[in-house]
Image (cartoon, grey):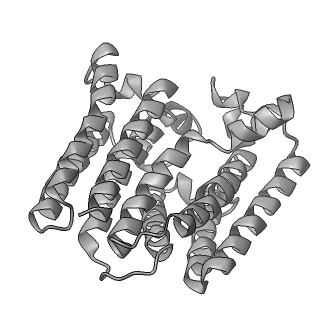
Amino acid sequence: MKLIKAIIVSTRPNTWMRIWGEMIVAASLASHPHFNPLRFLLVFLATSPLLWSAAYMLNDLTDIKYDTKHPLRRLRPITSGILTKSMTTILIILLIIGAFLIGYSINFTVLILLILLFISQIFYTFPHLRFKEVFLLDLLLNILNSILRYLLGWSSQEAVHPLIISPILLFTLIKIAFFLGHRLQNRNLEKFYKFRTTVTVLSEKHIVFTIFTSVFLALLVNTFLIYKGVFPIRSLTGFIALIPLFYYLQKSRFGKIIEVEKDINFRNILYFSFFIWSNITAFTIITK
C-alpha cells in the first residue's frame, strides 16, 4: 500500500486537472457539436496520467541531488528512496510505452505530438541539457508544452472547424502565470545552486508583475474570443470557478502571492478553479 501511494504521489495527480483544462477547450472548439468523449478521454489518458506522469518521475529522478536540499521536495518518494532509481526507471518506461500505444491507436498526429511532448521534457530536465536551468528557455519550453497539449486536445477529435491562434494565445498566457508562480517556491534553492533560471534572473517584483500582466492579458484575450463568437457569451458563467480561489487568497493574506505560492493547498485550489472554468467553457462551446 505504501508503494502504491508513493507511485500515485510521484505522478502529481493534482496536475491532471490543469492538463485536462488545456485540452478540453481545444477538443470542444475542434468538434462542436459532435464532441467525441471517448476519444478525448483516451488522448487525455495518454497525455497526462501516462506520459506526463513519466515526465514528472523523470524530473524527480534527475533532480535528486538538488531536491534533497529542499524542505518539502526531499520528502518526495523518489528523492527519499521509497521508490528506487531502478523501479522508477521501469515505471517511466512502462508509462511511456502505454502513452505511445494509445496515441498510435488514435492517429499518427496524436502519436507525433506525444513524442514531441516527451522530447521537450528530456530537453527540460535531462543531464547536460537541463533547459530548466537556463534563463527564458525554461519558460519557453513550458509554453511549448502547453501548446502541444492544446494540439493534443484538438487532435483527439475529428476537427470540423479551422484551428485558430487566439485560444492558443489564451492558454499560453495562463501557462506563463502558472509557471512563474510555481517556480517562485524554488527560487531560493535555485539561487543557492547558482542556476540562471527565469525566476533567479528576474527580481521578485518583476516576476509578480509578469504574472499579473499575463492574467490581465488573458482576460483581454478571453473577452476578444467572446466578442468574436469563438466562446459563447454563456462561457462567462465559468468565472464562478474563481470564487474558491479568491476566498482562499483573501483568507491567506490576499496579494502576497510569493508566500501563498509555497502552500500546496493554494496550488490545488488554483488548478481546481482552472479545471472548473475550462469545463464550463467547453460545455458552452459544445452546446452552443
Q: Is residue 48 left or right of residue 54?
A: left
Of residues 259 and 231, the one nearer the viewer is 231
Quadrant holding the N terminus = top right
Asked whether residue 153 is in view, the answer is yes
**Which of the image's four quarters has the C terminus?**
bottom left
Q: Residue at x 87, y 56 (%)?
A: 90
> Would you say 45 lies left or right of 197 here?
right
Residue at the image point whose x is 34% and y is 57% from the top: 282
Q: Residue furthest bottom?
A: 108
Where is residue 154? Give x, y as percent. Answer: 43, 72
Residue 263 seen in this snapshot: no
Q: Is residue 82 left or right of residue 139?
A: right
The mark tally for this picture is: 0
- The correct choice, above or below, for 182 with respect to 158 in the image is above
Picture coordinates of residue 182, whole percent (x, y): 45, 39
Residue 148 pos. (x, y %): 48, 69
Residue 59: image location, x then y, percent: 67, 50
At a point 50% along the width and 31% down the height, the residue shown is 188
Name the quadrant containing residue 173.
Answer: bottom left
Q: Nearer the viewer, residue 73 or 55?
A: 55
Which residue is pictured at 40% across the width and 23% down the height? 260
Residue sitting at the far left:
227
Q: Is residue 78 above or below residue 264?
A: below
